[in-house]
Image: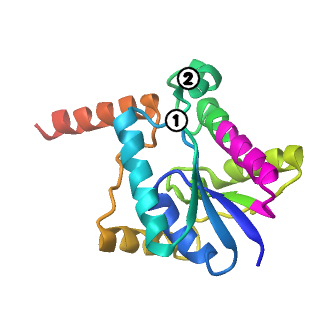
Amino acid sequence: MKSLLLHTCCAPCSIAVIDEMRTAYEVTVFFYNPNIYPLAEYETRKAEVIRVCREWGIIMIDLDNESAVWEAEVGGFGRGQEGGPRCSACFRLRLAKTAACAKERGFDLFATSLTSGRRKDSAAINAIGRAVSGLQGVAFLDEDWKKGGRQEKARQMVAERSIYRQSYCGCRFSLEDALARAEAEVRQAA
């Protein structure tokens, strides 16, 4: 069985992916998400991924929250629209770290659960994955995890386990956008 290093962003996005991949590969989960803000949110999301890994006996590599690295490499892009240059830079940062870890630790391939997000551009994320794969010389599993009923399966698995489901992507800019949307909805309802 080939070894797979699976970058996970959160339990809701990764639970169905982990479940599917653990039957096809020797899976190790990789938690590297310096974008998640604030620290309490980061810790909550990480705890849920740890819970899923423990349930299935999956090894997890947990890197420190390098928020200063994220700010230096991504924060300068500013607010912008979700899915724009800021997000691409964020995906590149996390996938490059995943590929480097996969190479360093001798994994056969790596993947990411990022493409399972309903607002995530799978083609763009997979293009970044292929690019960093070429730079590191480690194969990338190019997959759109939204397809094939996986989103529905993930929703069901999250509900069954009462897993925390976040209301924004993760970074401080996406949090600001989510808060602004919620405030607009309250004003509209009033």
Residue 134 on the magenta span: no
Please identify the quarter of the rendering in which residue 138 is found.
bottom right
Disc 1 marks which amino acid?
Answer: Asn
Residue pictured at 70% horizontal, 75% vertical:
25
CA–CA distance in space, label 1 to label 2: 9 Å
Q: Residues within 10 Å of mark 1 (few under 14, many from 20)?
A: some
Disc 2 marks which amino acid?
Answer: Ala
Q: Residues within 10 Å of mark 2 (few under 14, many from 20)?
A: few
Residue pictured at 63% horizontal, 81% vertical:
23
Q: Quadrant of the N terminus?
A: bottom right
Expressed as whole percent of the image width and height from the top left, the position of residue 39 reads 39, 34
Please identify the quarter of the rendering in which residue 3 is found.
bottom right
Expressed as whole percent of the image width and height from the top left, the position of residue 20 reads 58, 76
- Asked if marks 1 and 2 touch (Cβ < 8 Å), the reply is no
Residue hosting label 1? 65
Q: Is residue 59 left or right of residue 4?
A: left
Residue hosting label 2? 68
Q: Which SS class for mark 2?
A: helix
Residues drawn in magenta: 92-109
In the image, residue 16 above or below residue 128: below
